Image (cartoon, helix red, strand yellow):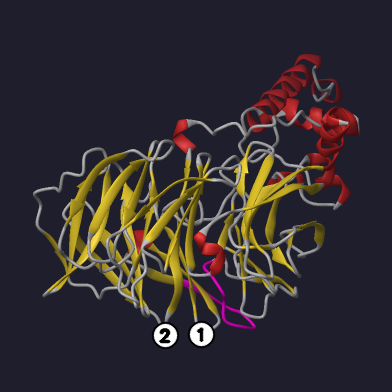
Amino acid sequence: MDYESRKVKWYWFLLFIIYCGGVAYALFQGNPLLYARSELRHELNLSQTGRRQTIPLHPVAPKANGATFQARYGSAHTAIDPFSAPRSKNYLEYEHIEVDSQFSGGGLQNATQDASGIYLSGKSAWAEALGLDGKVRWKFRFKNLAPEQSLLPVLLSESSAYLIHPSGEVVCFDKQSGEMRWQLTLKEDVAAQPIIWNEYILLPTKSSSGVHLNLIRADNGQVGAEDIHLEIKPGFLLSWGPSYKTLIATIDNKVIAIDPGEWKIVWTMPLTDPIRGPAVVVGSQIFVATLGAKIVKLDGSKGGKREWEADLPKAPASAPAFLPIINYLSVMDTSGAIAIIDAQFGKLHSHTVTENKNPLAETWSARIKGQYIEEFKMDWLHKGWTVWSPCGESRFCIYTPKAGLLVNRVQLSGRPLTLPLALDHRWIFLTQTKAGKLMLSTVLEEGEIKKLRAAGS
């Protein structure tokens, strides 16, 4: 009788199965850490030919909310592929076009790019706008520029380009036509690199007591009435994390947080060594590279509290790049080697030696397709995020994030000067020959190049 009472009832078993199914559905449905069902099925089941998509002969402009890529793809400086869509690993240079630019003779220091073109400035009174066909679309010359001065990087909004003279003159142009929209002369020397912040240009100028921060309306050039002064040394670099709502400045060995509501410094964190490059802002996480061969993580929500320091074999050559989902950092050091670091704990996962002989010493992160995740035995959970960087002589390479294994390399006709301009399935690089000539190199998937050449034959 007791045995009969302990038998499992059939409806208990049915309820248990329904409960397990509900838990599994809640776990997998809409989970941002996992591939979508349709995407996973597409990657695993389609043939190699079926995976390829037709590449338009003219690049398609990104959506308006992601149209502009400033240095390192935005003011957070995370160096992440703005599209975040899975990409092929098999790329070849489709064409390279020599650019008839006065900067081919030297003096180029800054290149800002978006879907409208590439904007050049440096040790010259001229600034140029290049179309993606390699032709100079328009250019502008300031009246004078002292030999020791340089024009600042061109700032870009959705429709405008802003040229900035170190003496405080700002000129706004239509990006496409080159028509001048407005001009402003502040008569104050620029104290640090400006950024576009919301609808304003934040332009720091020198004052008798630190820095005067000018809020300039990007649409009409009107200067805000607020008299904003910050006790901060000139020469700082600004970062802005949209979710953090705080401006982060780096100067010498200090990381400084600025409240844009009251325009005051809320905390300052001194580090042991000078900082290289801007801060990388991911939520309230702040990552900086120092000349003492360290990557340092600060918690912005806790007054810049230092969470960890990761030691590198050599000093970093640039600020780190962030890999989403997997929560890693990648950084190239002055020897050309690439270090992969756990962004949560600061653990050094790998150190890959490369022989980068290019002026560009940056890394950035992009996703590769599911078929390559299987091929290189990567973790599906992390959606194929990989490290991309210049390597060797005139090449761009792809590495796995944990072990730093080489996935593939793209050979270019010149040395890359900029991170690639990502336009749908097309990459465009500003490159330079050994003779100093500038070129635009267009890179496409290998299969698409064969199709285009077959169509043209």
Of residues 213 and 37, the one nearer the viewer is 213
Q: Is residue 197 magenta?
A: no
Image location (x, y in percent) of residue 225: 8, 49
Which image quarter: residue 256?
Answer: bottom left
- The image quadrant where one finds the C terminus is top right
Which image quarter is the N terminus in?
Answer: top right
Count of all numbered marks drawn on residues in the image: 2
Instruction: Indicate the amino acid at tag 2.
Output: Thr
Q: The magenta stretch spans which residues?
A: 307-319
| SS type, badge 2 | loop
**Seen from this angle, which residue lies furthest top?**
11
The residue that appears at 79% across and 47% down in the rendered structure is 91
Identify which residue, 286 or 126, lies in the foreground.
126
- Identify the element where label 1 is drawn: loop
Tags 2 and 1 touching, CB below 8 Å: yes
Residue at image mark 2: 272
Is residue 183 left or right of 253 when viewed as pictured?
left
315 drawn magenta: yes
User: Is 113 left, or right, of 367 in this rendering?
Assistant: left
Task: Give amino acid for label 1.
Answer: Gly
> Is 337 placed left or right of 307 in the picture?
right
Residue at 85% from the left image edge and 52% from the top image edge: 377
- List the residue tagged with mark 1: 292
Distance from label 2 to label 1 (Cα)?
A: 8 Å
Q: Earlier in the sequence, mark 2 or mark 1?
A: 2
Is residue 192 placed above or below 52 in the rendered structure?
A: below
